[in-house]
Amino acid sequence: MRKQTIHILAIESSCDDTSAAVLSDKRVLSNIISTQDVHEKYGGVVPELASRSHQKNIVPVANAAIEQAGLSKNNLDAVAYTVGPGLPGSLIVGSAFAKSISMALDVPLIEVNHMEAHILAHFIEDAHPTAPVFPFLCLTVSGGHSQIVLVKDYNKFEVVGQTLDDAAGEAFDKIAKLIGLSYPGGPLIDKHAAKGNAERFSFSKPKVDSFNYSFSGLKTGVLYFLRDSLKENPAFIKENFDDICASVQKTIIEILINKLEKAARHFGILQIAVAGGVSANSSLRAALKERETSLHWKTFVPPIEYCTDNAAMIGITAYFKYIHKEFSDLNSVPKARLYL
């Protein structure tokens, strides 16, 4: 018989956010995130600066998570961390810290796949009134990934579609840069799109086989569209800013949803979830909600705090690994490239 309540300290450091969370079984007691603003002026994440910031932030962030949870370090039953995918230097900081705490407290160490964690965030106790039922499809969209995943169980994932080049979040950020928005540009496009006419401009959608995605062509198409428009009117972007944002966002969301619909029909699945940073996008959320009526989907969209990178999703994944005794050891090595 397992311990009645499991307390897990989880560490997430895959990119530029330092996060620590404490979970009591599937309930989040704390979820602290320290965001690095240093990358904004560079228009993207600088790996070396990210790892240095993690080194500075990880101890106070972890201490804050434990304090907010109302526990002491001696109450912890395991320590979990993101093993990959992610930036090598950032992952190493989280790995070294988690191993040190695990060794000092003599508690199990649990390594977690970042992409699995995004999906399993749906099983956090306060994420939904009821969690998705297996099997379900999960659209995982972020700055680095765009995937359609068939989720058969807590530890059984099949990637049935994925981007062949740029991810959706990457397309948002790169197009945002073209029109003069700061990094990260996706949330800013979403904000301006709410004030624009999404039907104003039309952009071509890629023709890609099966359930896969491609966004590099869209990025290039927008680049040429802006170049040609600026030749005729140097103030074109400024005068049409909100409409450009709305039209670009509409195109990206339609590309995502069209392939998701195709996969849902193919597999005969009506339980549809979304995960990753782009799942915070208001247009994507509205599109999924609309399909609850038009296609009879049961959709699962996580709260905003569980969409972007956070340690709570690492903790919930570690919980399922803990009850199945899937522990790691000090030989565990971070992996910049790691797949489902």
Image (spheres, rainbow, N blue to C red):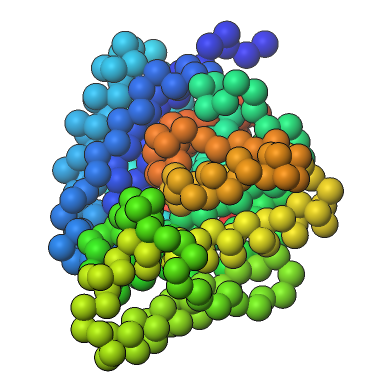
Q: Quick check: can you spot residue 128?
A: yes
Q: Quadrant of the N terminus?
A: top right
At a point 26% along the width and 60% down the height, the residue shown is 183
Percent across and percent down for residue 284 are 52, 50
Observer-nearest of 169 and 84: 169
Q: Nearer the viewer, residue 320 or 245?
A: 245
Which residue occupies 70% across, 36% down?
298
Quadrant housing residue 136? top right
Residue 62's image quarter?
top left
Q: Answer yes or no: is residue 153 visible.
A: no
Instruction: Please identify the quadrant where the C terminus is shown.
Output: bottom right
Residue 283 drawn above or below residue 147? above
In this view of the protein, which residue sits in the foreground, 280 or 103? Answer: 280
Q: Where does residue 29 sit, x and y in percent of width and height? A: 40, 18
Q: In screen coordinates, is 217 left or right of 90?
A: right
Percent across and percent down for residue 89 are 30, 57
Residue at position x 69%, y 39% in the image = 292
Kindly identify the residue that appears in the image at 76 percent across and 40 percent down: 296
Q: Is residue 91 left or right of residue 27?
A: left
